[in-house]
Amino acid sequence: MPEAADTISGELVAWSREQLNIAVGELIRAGELDGVLLEARPAWAYPRSTVIGKIREQGEHHRFFWVICGDPPVDYISSTMAATPREAARHFAMKWQLEAARHREPQVQRKLDPEGKRNWDAWCDALEARASSLFKLIDADALWTAAAIR
């Protein structure tokens, strides 16, 4: 039986690292990170759904960013905004709810999309759904001890 647990754990770690690599690439392409000597490691994961990890410049031990990826939109915050992966997840979920509400405002939509090409209702609905799904994970206490990656 320990071998099966080790395999699942190994698969989860490998999947989590793959998702973090994708997220780091997206953040570099978006100009959010410079890509020079970055370290990324998973801190918590829910299999085949969500990874919360830490990204920092190599050699920095106290300053880092929390990043969320997998099914959720790739997003990141400073480590000063959350002390644990669960707190970071709560921050992301609240941030997405507020962002969706803000983007429902016609004046915000006109500013960001003057030609009206984006379907804002669908975009906001999707972001709110991601936030809701993440809140469900946050509320499940057992997941935060069982799915921790060390």
Image (cartoon, helix red, strand yellow):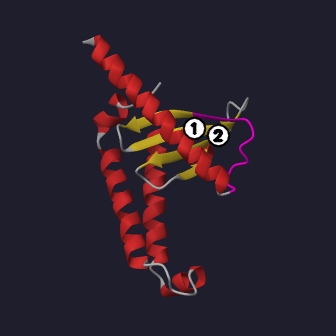
| Side of 105 where 134 appears, left or right | left
Q: Is residue 82 among the parts visible in the rendering?
A: no
How far apart marks 1 and 2 lie (CA) works out to: 6 Å
Amino acid type of disc 2? Phe
Return the residue at label 2. Answer: 64
Mark found first going from the N terminus, 1 or 2:
1
Image spot of residue 109 (x, y percent): 52, 82
Numbered badge on residue 54 = 1
Question: Is residue 2 placed above or below 88 in the rendered structure?
Answer: above
| Numbered disc 1: secondary structure | strand
Residue 108: quadrant of the picture: bottom right
Question: Is residue 97 placed above or below 72 in the rendered structure?
Answer: below
| Side of 142 where 86 appears, left or right | right
Segment tinted magenta in the rendering:
31-40
Is the residue marked by circle 2 packed among few (<14), some (14-19), or many (20+) residues within 10 Å?
A: some
Image spot of residue 63 (x, y percent): 68, 38
